[in-house]
Amino acid sequence: MKFMKLGSKPDAFQADGKCIRYVTSDLATDVTINVGEVKFYLHKFPLLSKSSRLRKLVLKASEECCDEINMVDFPGGPKAFGICAKFCYGMTVTLNAYNVVAARCAAEYLEMTEDVDRGNLIFKIEVFLNSSIFRSWKDSIIVLQTTKSVLPWSENLKIVGRCIDSIASKTSVDPANITWSYTYNRKLSVSDKTAGDGMKFREKIISVPKDWWVEDICELDIDLYKRVMTAVKSKGRMDGVAICEALKTYAVRWLPDSVDSLDSDVHSWRNKLLVETIVCLLPSDRGVDCSCSFLLKLLKVAILVGVDNSAKEDLLKRISLKLYEASVKDLLIPARPPQTTLYDVEMVLSIVKRYMMHRHDLDVAKNEMGCTDFVLGHGSLLSVGKLIDEYLEEIARDPNLSLASFIDLSQSVPEFATPVHDGLYKAIDTYLKEHLSLTKVERKKLCSLMDVKKLTMDASMHAAQNERLPLRVVVQVLFFEQVRSAAGVQPLRNTSHYTTNTEEESEKTAAEDCNSLEKQMSRIKIKEDAFQEKCELAKQSSKNSKSGIQLLPSRSRRMFGKLWGFEKGHADNRSSETSASSQSPTSMVPGDTKSSGSSSRNRRHSIS
């Protein structure tokens, strides 16, 4: 810490209790000055030789025959006045980052200028500030913190602004050129070490990171922190990633961990102000810098403390642009009354819709630019589809989650976003397990979201033995597995390995898997058609036999016989529904198709 000593005489100030200060001298004191609750018994001559204001006050007191001078609103209080008084006496005074601002404001109040005496206190403090304090990283932060106690004097003297500018300028210094200790806990350099040949050298413990400054300014109050960060951003030399890291560090430092603390009346106003300030300081480029996880955590806190709608709207827009980076845990936003569900499903649905609108705008822009690569342009969309399936499985355990909400969220992403339906099947199975009161129609409607052709072998085996599924769905699973087995097609690959590391990796993986899936589905379609032709020929050659389904296992034959009327006496009297089913084993009940025919999930049946 930088410091400056003024004066050379020994300190002769004495204290008599808490409220009396006097100077030990052979001469009797001739003026009494009250600063706050403290009385100073001093001599006129040394004070009047340095302070223009004291001259005026002493003259006024003499005219009014008053023995005391009152300074009720003195900036910095008795301590600051004591520094100025000692300087007038020529006694030794030490200025440092903790007391220099109060001394500067006090000197301004007392009008200790160069017009009164050359080399006066104001001049000396200004030299110290400009040559030492504002050149020091840590001292600038300390001084800025002390300015709050002497407002508005520190503001009017532009000390606050100069501190902020000093701090903001240092944050943009090339890390390779930083030689000072840049945090209170870490050191940049170690002590001199002696090499084997007797030469001394200094070495760096670690390289200085680009965001080296974020921890130190976290000690500032929110209003000063906001002004510093605004200045840092206005310099234009700090990238958005470092800005986001600084805001995240500040939020972790000051926001309480528990929900009860966030909701408490004591700190609710402060927490609300803190969140709104962080949101307004987020980088202007909404789609690049801050992680989706941090934004979602900020949104959860914003909802709890009740920030205004503009701040929440800004967060929702930012989150929707980076939804593909989110995890299921991030999306578990607690619901607030009057909602009865555990999590705020409506808000997640709103985020997904915003994301899809943004994707639509991007697609339109790409088409206008002549970009036609459909698969490579939707890598992030595949990540979102997988994320929604996992989120559905998590919220399906909520007994208060309505079927309509489940369906709406499932249909919020297009069919190509989920090339494999294992995740959706798990979510549906979980919902059926937790909602046993569903009617038959509701179960069919729920299961119509799933395309059995997009299930992997493991999921198909589980579904074939799942008693919670409607019979028609089980038959479709069995039939399709039989077709796939007869066609000799490799089972669909499970796409659970999709990650959200980078857009480029996601798009590359998407291209490979989508091309593979398209080839497999085409082969399955061809083999399925050939298999059905064989079945038709077999049925024509022997109308009273069951040779048309001999390739199916015994359980499958019983189900097909029950559902499609292959038993004796029913072969010629099939209903229109049965006929439709025999033509397309994966089609749904016509009534169900009508009820949700306009949804994006139902269009997945046309992939093959």
Image: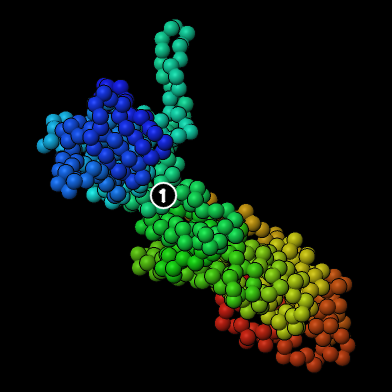
Q: Residue furthest front?
A: 65
**Where residue 433 sits: x, y (%)?**
76, 71
Up/down of 361 relative to 260, above or below = below
In the displayed structure, 134 sits above or below 253; it is: above
- Residue at image coords 47%, 26%: 205
Which residue is the extreme one toward the left? 115
Q: Residues within 10 Å of mark 1 (few under 14, many from 20)?
A: some
Q: Quadrant of residue 594?
A: bottom right
Residue at image point 41% right, 46% down? 220
- Does residue 319 appear left or right of residue 223 in this picture? right
Between 367 and 149, the one lying in front of the other is: 149
**Residue 508 image position (x, y, % from top left):** 52, 54
Q: Which residue lies at the image location 71% right of the left edge and 66% below the top edge?
A: 426
User: How far across and how far down the image is residue 253, in percent?
Assistant: 50, 48
Would residue 477 be seen by someone viewing this image from the given angle? no
The residue that disc 1 covers is 221
Badge 1 amino acid = Asp
Residues 349 and 129: in front is: 129
Q: Quadrant of the C terminus?
A: bottom right
Rendered residue at 42%/40% (across/down)? 216
* Residue 473 in sight: yes
Determine whether the residue tagged by mark 1 lies in a helix, strand or loop.
loop
Report the front residue among 76 and 23: 23
